[in-house]
Image (spheres, rainbow, N blue to C red):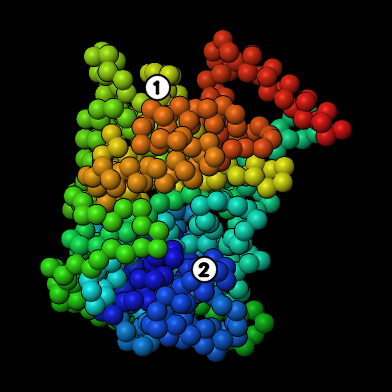
Amino acid sequence: MFEMCDAFIRATTFIYVLASFFSPGINLVRGEEDYNKMYNKSDIHKKILDEVNNLNKTKQNITEKTVPLISLLAVKAQNKDAPVRIVMFHPSYVQKGTFGAEEAFKMVRDWSNKIDIRLAMWGSNFEGHEIGVHHQKSIVVGTDEGLIGFCGGIDFAFGRWTKSEHNLDRILDTPDTVDPPFRIDTQMSWISDKNVMGEYIWDKKKKKGSYICKPGNEWFGEGCEEGSQVLWHDVHAKVVGPDAYDLALNFSRRYEKADTNYSITESDPLDLSKNKRTVTTPFKFPPKADLKNEIEQYKNKYASLSSEEGYSRGKVWAQILRSYSPDEDYGIWDAYRNLFSKAKKNIYIENQYPFEDGEVLKVLIDNIGNKKKSKKEFRVIVVAPVMPDHYDTAIRKNLAKLINTNRDKIAAYSLVSTSGERRIPIYVHAKIAIIDDEWAIVGSANLDRFGMGGATSKQPRGSSEMAILVHGKEQALALRKMLVKEHLGPGAPADPDDFNNVFDAFKNVAAKNRLPKDDGPIIGHLVKHRVYEDMNSKDSGGLKSLISHYLRRINSYLNQA
């Protein structure tokens, strides 16, 4: 978010935003230290942020130092520094809720009539739109030097990001920390740091515990309303050069297909009765701009890649991939299929819905089987949420199937943080894979059928997705080492370049931290995945595991007493 904020400030020719879940009021910096760091980067940063603060104060009487996304974009649009164009997801009634999309659209219109915002409508009834969701998350910014692009899994949405320490006690997007002018109640109502999805609550009176939320197989986790996600783990990539240019071209395609059949419902201002009636009227979008000239000027003009915390900056072979309809573009699925089938030594995966898709699972299991036949060592690490908002049963079943192909070489983990005596699940929303420490894919696509494009006989189309595929050992290793350091903390190995060392370190740290439902202090954030509860209950170690768990509980209560 910090890097995207910097890019927006530097924009001189255009700002393109492809948004899935979208909260215009999200703050792009966290706390006064980050604000001052951004403010003091250059004279243009000081100028723009002063204008942002003046707009906040004038429009909403906000005096504290903050950089809401909508304020920054409004300043850039009003100054005519750069055209601001947004394509955001607008769900259908079939998806059982608007997710605050209409309120977000209205907030953008209210703050600036200079911002060109359009809607990627839901699915099957609209030509050019996916049957799943518009799930792409990318940013492209045109500067004097060249294009700066971002793509990955991070949404501009409340509750979607924290710093890498994942501390519940730090500044988060909760209803009592977001200024009312920027808050969208339909997006904030489910965010609570008191009731966290996947947290294990022990009932002392009943002498038993349970996980908050029992996901069903419904779309968008209707069975999970009792729990929220407040600590998110996610990954975005920042790119310059031809890949940034391709991101701009992709935006133009989405832009051309946007704003189909939209109407807006508002209270009638002429109705003065206590029970005001609402009126629904078609919304007329202004004519679309021709983006060809905006984008074409950057075809052979490349910006340098600078970063406050650059993990790797060298030139690299890379390709932008999509799942996109109606072009029948299944580039992300093709990449995963090829990478998982041809991996030689190891794979590191982080995904919100790992292997809900059976076709992806089969490709990997077939490769593992071939490696076993040829007696070649092959290791796989999977990091997934304690409890996803749906697919929970299918994911645990498929992860168990994967792990059982070779329990010594394949393992699954989740992430938790602590607050007092609580273990708070960190919601893994990242969608990445690192193969043989040489290839890396970072994007928006989950390892479910929607994320892979939906290309099956039963489901002809899936969600629109975006990813970057990188072939470079320096970049792949930099990403993996960054994640290892974050997840293991002081338990990280001295030589993280060696995947075998990392595999063993993950195993050792998770063995000490145990399962998400266990208590006590933790090292880093890593715990065993819940799938091991299922597996232990079915094998000879199940009774031993159960007894061990209750002995730890008894010991904990004795210590408290």
Q: Where residue 329 is drawn, which disc sits there?
A: none
Q: Residue 514 vs residue 234: left or right?
A: right
Residue nearest the viewer, comparing 394 with 203: 203
- SS of the residue under disc 2: helix
* Most foreground residue, 422 or 40: 40
Residue 12 falls in image quadrant: bottom left
Q: Mark 2 points at which residue?
A: 34
The x, y position of residue 352, in whole percent, is: 44, 43
- How dense is the environment of label 1, judged by Cα within 10 Å: few (below 14), some, or many (20 and up)? some
Circles 2 and 1 in contact, beta carbons < 8 Å:
no
Q: In which quarter of the image is residue 199?
A: top right
Determine the residue positioned at 87% across, 33% down. Answer: 561
The mark nearer the N terminus, 2 or 1, is 2
Q: Give the amino acid type for the residue marked by disc 2 in the picture.
A: Asp
Q: Position of residue 329 (x, y in %)?
A: 20, 49
User: How far apart in space, not on screen, are marks 2 and 1 (Cα)?
Assistant: 41 Å
In this image, 245 relative to 458: left or right?
left
Q: Which mark is residue 409?
A: 1
For the N terminus, the image quarter is bottom left
Residue shown at 61% from the left, 74% from the top = 180
Identified by mark 1, the residue type is: Lys
Please identify, in this view, whether the residue under mark 2 or under mark 1 is nearer the observer: 2
For the question of whether residue 375 can be seen, the reply is yes
Residue 494 relative to residue 369: left or right:
right
Q: Which residue is drawn at 51% across and 52% down?
A: 164
